[in-house]
């Protein structure tokens, strides 16, 4: 049972445009959501997060939106830069489950110059 | 601040052989995690330690995988005997106890079982 899903395995976007990555979850116990970015041969690095009590969190070019009723979150990157080309993982956590992270399958983003 | 260290970075073994991975977390981080990431998938938690105690090992294949965190700092993950399906990247992560959900990952060990 895949509790966190990223249905788009890849995304290609022109430099300067917006990248929108989507993530769906099924477990209503999840109360914290994170996005990680991963370059080849490196471990995932934390990008941005959002608590379930909020519906938006912004950090520079990155904004995460949470729609609890739809069990959906999205990551917006604007403007997209070539250095943003990486695999992005959505992750969810539940305090009741000891804060362990459940990851989606990832979305590979390619930003074209 | 030094990041999470892992070694080796790459390992190739034959099936039925054994292998061990080492992780040194960020200094002061009480919680340590081992994840398995199969190609094309997201990381899957194998085991979580808090200090030197196991918090969650529900997804660890205990017939062949074992892990320890002696003295609550470094950790080793062992596979014995390895199977072809164990080919993956093994990621170690750590986090502090201060209520943050944020985990910091090491570079991983890429294991190929032939």
Image (spheres, grey):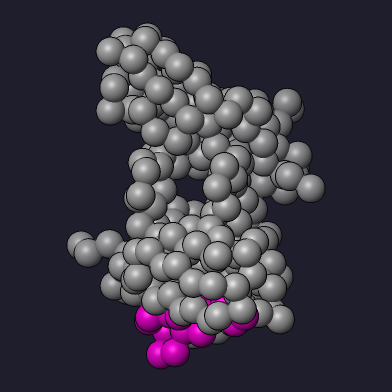
Q: From the viewer's side, name the closer residue of B13 and A102.
A: B13
- Residue A48 appears at what percent x and percent y? 42, 38
Is residue A76 rendered magenta in the image?
no
Q: Could you say which quadrant of the image residue A72 lies in?
A: top right
Q: From the viewer's side, name the closer residue of B78 and B32.
A: B78
- Residue A79 appears at what percent x and percent y? 33, 14
- The range drawn in magenta is B68-81
Answer with left or right where residue A12 lies relative to residue B27. Answer: right
Q: Quadrant of the C terminus of chain A?
A: top left
Is residue B76 rendered magenta in the image?
yes
- Residue B84 appears at what percent x and percent y? 62, 64
Q: Residue at x 49, y 26 (%)?
A: A75
Q: Is residue B93 visible?
A: no
Q: Could you say which quadrant of the image residue B96 lies in?
A: bottom left
Question: In the orientation shown, which residue stands out farthest toward the left?
Answer: B1
Answer with left or right where residue B102 lies relative to residue A22. Answer: left
Q: From the viewer's side, name the closer residue of A89 and A10.
A: A10
Q: From the viewer's side, name the closer residue of B45 and A109.
A: A109
Q: Residue at x 47, y 84 (%)?
A: B69
Q: Residue at x 27, y 62 (%)?
A: B3
Compared with residue B61, is residue A25 higher up or lower down, i.e. above or below? above
């Amino acid at each position: 049972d895949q509790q966190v899903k990223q249905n788009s395995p890849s995304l290609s976007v022109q430099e300067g445009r917006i990248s929108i990555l989507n993530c769906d979850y099924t477990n209503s116990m999840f109360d914290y959501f994170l996005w990680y970015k991963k370059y080849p041969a490196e471990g995932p690095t934390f990008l941005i997060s959002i608590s379930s009590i909020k519906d938006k969190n912004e950090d520079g070019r990155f904004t995460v939106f949470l729609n609890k009723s739809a069990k959906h979150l999205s990551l917006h990157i604007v403007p997209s830069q070539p250095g943003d080309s990486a695999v992005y993982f959505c992750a969810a956590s539940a305090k009741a489950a000891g804060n362990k992270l459940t990851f989606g399958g990832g979305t590979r983003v390619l930003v074209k110059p | 601040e030094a990041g999470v260290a892992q070694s080796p970075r790459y390992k190739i073994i034959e099936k039925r052989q054994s292998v061990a991975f080492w992780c040194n977390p960020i200094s002061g981080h009480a919680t340590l995690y081992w994840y398995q990431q199969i190609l094309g998938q997201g990381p899957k938690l194998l085991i979580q330690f808090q200090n030197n105690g196991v918090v969650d090992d529900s997804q660890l294949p205990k017939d062949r995988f074992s892990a320890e965190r002696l003295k609550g700092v470094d950790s080793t993950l062992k596979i014995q005997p390895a199977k072809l399906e164990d080919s993956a990247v093994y990621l170690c992560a750590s986090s502090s106890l201060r209520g943050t959900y944020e985990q910091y990952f090491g570079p991983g060990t890429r294991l190929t079982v032939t």
